[in-house]
């Protein structure tokens, strides 16, 4: 889900000196107002839950068809050396993989590993969606279309971490024990996206996240090709295509909510954007670096895999996708929310321009950090 994987890299525990020095993604959090976090666990009014019950037939017709039948899905083994071949042929395929991956730079590996770890924390994401009132899987095998979607979405996403994990394992470039510890820490820590068990907020969050992971995996595909690994490029591009299809599903749900309940939908979008969209892996830890997520985010920003500009672009895309600027007949609260959300991409870009200027000054004093994932090699942050 990436979050990467990967939307709105949000700083939670960044010390002031580092906070001032890091550019890009981190700077958005540095210059924006503190995130709004309400101590709410069930913010969906009963009448809003009825909206989702009434949409079950619509979901069956418009969301479930975006899933692919298992028999038509790619599987990780389609991209990996085949262990059923004679030993010498299998070993030859592994050697070819290792020769290609030997050309991947350390900073690229850091971003690819971070994306993979984010994907591997999938149990947390399914759990989060199953906290949403009105759409959760009540039995664990419910035939409700919302529950069917969540389980099948999870099954499709599960292939992403599996494939990247195996590829990196075979490359020999990665300290897999530290990676595995990071995955265990992350699943144990969970995540707090601020969705309040509210499917309005939950589906807005997943809409943003799926587009962010589509962008992130697409950029890792481009860089893999540039670094001479066409197989890895195809892997990352294939994962990006899954994320794009999943984005279509979640944005379609929110689009329907905007149609049926424009006031409730727009106010919910404002709620999430005032909090800021946090990365699913924002509690990432390897047990050594207390700022691991922030450091990973900084490298992703520097390489252009996922940037503060992407954050603004995603929001602008969703404003257009959901036609938020043309909604009429809103309440006073709805109009305020509409104005805030529609103006926000430009505000983020202006803040980023100022942050980029500060980053130019910070770049005069480059900062390097060791990453346990790659045997404590140093990687440039700024």
Image (cartoon, rainbow, N blue to C red):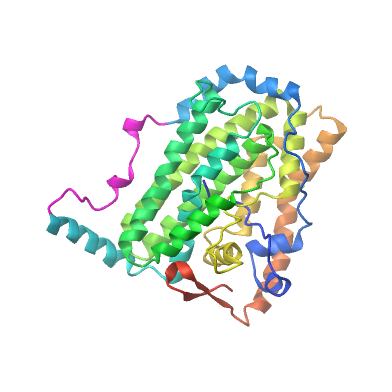
The answer to whether any part of residue 196 appears in the image is yes
Whether residue 291 sits left or right of residue 177 in the image: it is right
Tell me which segment is drawn in magenta: 68-86
**Vertical relation: 357 (above or below) 115:** below
- In the rendered structure, does residue 202 fall within the stretch colored magenta? no
Q: Relative to 141, is 29 above or below?
A: below
Residue 8: x and y in percent read: 63, 53
Q: State the count of labels.
A: 0
Compared with 338, 353 (above or below) is below
Seen as rendered, the residue at the extreme bottom is: 365
Using the rendered view, name the quadrant where residue 101 is placed: bottom left
Q: Quadrant of the C terminus?
A: bottom right
Seen at 70% across and 58% down, the residue is: 349
* Closer to the camera in the image, 381 or 12: 12
Q: Is residue 145 above or below residue 68?
A: above
Residue 84 forms part of the magenta stretch? yes
Say whether residue 315 is left or right of residue 340.
left
Q: Pick out the residue farthest to the right.
A: 332
What residue is shown at x 83% (from left), y 39% (from top)? 336
Where's residue 175, x and y in %? 40, 66
Residue 89 quadrant:
bottom left
Observer-nearest of 177 and 336: 177
Main SS class of the magenta portion in the image: loop
Q: Position of residue 229 (x, y in %)?
A: 33, 61
Q: Nearer the viewer, residue 263 or 3?
A: 3
Q: Position of residue 113 (x, y in %)?
A: 45, 60
Residue at 34% over, 60% down: 169
In front of the other: 177 or 169: 177
Residue 6 seen anywhere in this rendered image of the structure: no
């Amino acid at each position: 889900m990436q979050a990467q994987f990967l939307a709105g890299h949000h700083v939670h525990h960044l010390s002031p000196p580092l906070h001032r020095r890091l550019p890009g993604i981190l700077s958005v959090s540095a210059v924006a107002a503190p995130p709004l976090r309400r101590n709410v666990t069930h913010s969906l009014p009963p009448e809003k839950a009825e909206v989702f019950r009434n949409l079950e037939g619509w979901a069956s017709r418009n969301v479930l068809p975006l899933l692919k039948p298992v028999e038509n899905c790619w599987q990780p083994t389609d991209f990996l050396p085949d262990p059923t071949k004679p030993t010498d042929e299998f070993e030859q395929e592994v050697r070819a993989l290792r020769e290609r991956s030997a050309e991947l730079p350390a900073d690229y590996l850091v971003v690819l590993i971070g994306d993979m770890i984010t994907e591997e924390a999938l149990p947390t994401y399914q759990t989060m969606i199953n906290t949403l009132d009105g759409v959760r899987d009540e039995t664990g095998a419910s035939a409700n279309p919302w529950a069917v979607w969540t389980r099948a979405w999870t099954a499709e996403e599960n292939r992403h971490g599996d494939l990247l994990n195996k590829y990196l394992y075979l490359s020999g470039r990665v300290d897999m024990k530290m990676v595995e510890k990071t995955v265990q820490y992350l699943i144990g820590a969970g995540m707090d996206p601020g969705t309040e068990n509210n499917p309005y907020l939950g589906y807005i969050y997943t809409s943003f996240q799926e587009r962010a992971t589509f962008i992130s995996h697409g950029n890792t595909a481009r860089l893999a090709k540039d670094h001479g690994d066409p197989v890895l490029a195809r892997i990352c591009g294939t994962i990006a295509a899954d994320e794009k299809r999943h984005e279509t599903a979640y944005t379609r749900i929110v689009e329907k909510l905007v149609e049926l309940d424009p006031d409730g939908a727009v106010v919910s979008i404002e709620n999430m954007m005032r909090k800021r969209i946090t990365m699913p892996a924002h509690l990432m830890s390897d047990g050594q670096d207390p700022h691991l997520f922030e450091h990973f985010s900084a490298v992703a920003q520097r390489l252009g895999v996922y940037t503060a500009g992407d954050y603004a672009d995603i929001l602008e895309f969703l404003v257009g996708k959901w036609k938020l600027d043309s909604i009429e007949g809103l309440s006073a609260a709805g109009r305020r929310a509409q104005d805030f959300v529609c103006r926000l991409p430009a505000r983020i870009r202006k803040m980023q321009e100022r942050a980029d200027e500060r980053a130019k000054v910070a770049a005069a004093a480059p900062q390097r950090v060791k990453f346990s994932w790659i045997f404590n090699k140093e990687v440039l942050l700024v």
